[in-house]
Amino acid sequence: MLLFKGPRDQLLVPLQSVCGIVEKRHTLPILSNVLLEMEGGRLTLLATDIEIQIRTAAEAAGKETAALTVGARKMQDILRSLPESADVSLAYEDKRLQLKAGKSRFNLQTLPAEDFPRMAAGDGQQTALKVTQKQFKRLLALVQYAMAQQDIRYYLNGLLLVVTGNEMRVVATDGHRLAYAAEELAEQHGRLEIILPRKTVLELSRQLADNDEALEIVLTPTQAQFRFGNIELVSKLIDGKFPDYERVIPQHHTKAILLDRAMLQHSLQRAAILTNEKFRGVRLVLGPGSLKILSTNAEQEEAQEEIEVDYQGDALDVGFNVTYLLDVLNNIGDETIECRLADANSSALFVLPNNERFKYVVMPMRI
């Protein structure tokens, strides 16, 4: 039974769209597979890791109906290794999938489609949002680096998405720093808070295009659906209580300096070379007209950078993890950033000039 016939990329591109979430080793072997469903001249590809499910489609050759699962990574590796100009065909016979391209032949084992787990539709009230792919991709880029990775407080290993009125907010924190960004929505909505898992956020960042095409988001109390282009991504949510981010953001820091983002970034990168490898600490010494960046390490080596700033207030000496400072500078595109400070025991607040929709808070460290 012929499932597909056409250029390599017509099959490889949709396969790559779903393969990102497939785990290499899984206790359930079928989760290493991709589900191929043929119906009405359309080949649907679906992959899942139980927490996330991605579906997309390709134009097919046959008109018959069939369903099977096959090793996702193997099939992807075979297609990648073929010449870009290759024409590929897929045929299903005797529980094996044969992939042909020119004089190459590959026979792959399949597992039954009925054993493949699918995510059930989410229950409860639905909230539907529409933004552009570019808007949401930028929102994620502004905060995702602040997510925790394997924190015992599982709700920190993800991203808080808040819908309130005509605004969508995203917040991420690992307990040492917090990033907040907001975007205006075209319509008014009731208040809703959900926590997206880290893997979902990273997969969306990888897949979303930097363009003005539509992204539809449908949220329920247990699930989030994202539809864009030819792709539908469905994700379970993290069940937990996210910290009160509004309490964490400082309101009355009196020492404010405007800095050239690239200059600060390069100064910190140079100073970081001589930091202690474990703690990665740098001292920011603020005085009239200058900001000094100092670092030392266990070998008694030292680095000092100095930036001229428009500041005439009291002196201040405060330490921070240089990685946390570089993370924000690497992920914002603006040329200027404003740093607000209070004292040696208070966190720093980074904002964008004339933009209340982005905030980044970093806790101080003793050096």
Image (cartoon, rainbow, N blue to C red):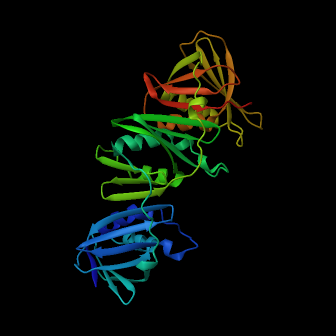
Farthest top residue in view: 312
Farthest bottom residue in view: 94
Q: Nearer the viewer, residue 90 or 264?
A: 90
Residue at screen point 53% across, 51% down: 198
Up the image or down, 66 lies above or below 348; here it is below
Q: Which x, y percent locates residue 353?
A: 45, 22
Residue at screen point 35% across, 72% down: 82
Q: Which x, y percent locates residue 138?
A: 41, 40
Q: Which x, y percent locates residue 207?
A: 39, 53
For residue 101, say whether it is visible.
no
Q: Nearer the viewer, residue 284 or 191?
A: 191
Q: Nearer the viewer, residue 88 or 177?
A: 177
Up the image or down, 170 lies above or below 264; here it is below
The quarter of the picture where residue 61 lies is: bottom left
Up the image or down, 7 lies above or below 223; here it is below
Up the image or down, 334 lies above or below 139; here it is above
For residue 14, say whether it is visible.
yes
Residue at screen point 60% across, 20% down: 291
In the rendered image, the quadrant that contains the N terminus is bottom left
Residue at screen point 42% across, 61% down: 121
- Horizontal side, residue 233 vs residue 2: left or right: right
- Horizontal side, residue 338 vs residue 341: left or right: left
Total numbered labels: 0
In the rendered image, the quadrant that contains the C terminus is top right
- Horizontal side, residue 178 vs residue 129: left or right: right
Q: Which x, y percent locates residue 331?
A: 48, 38
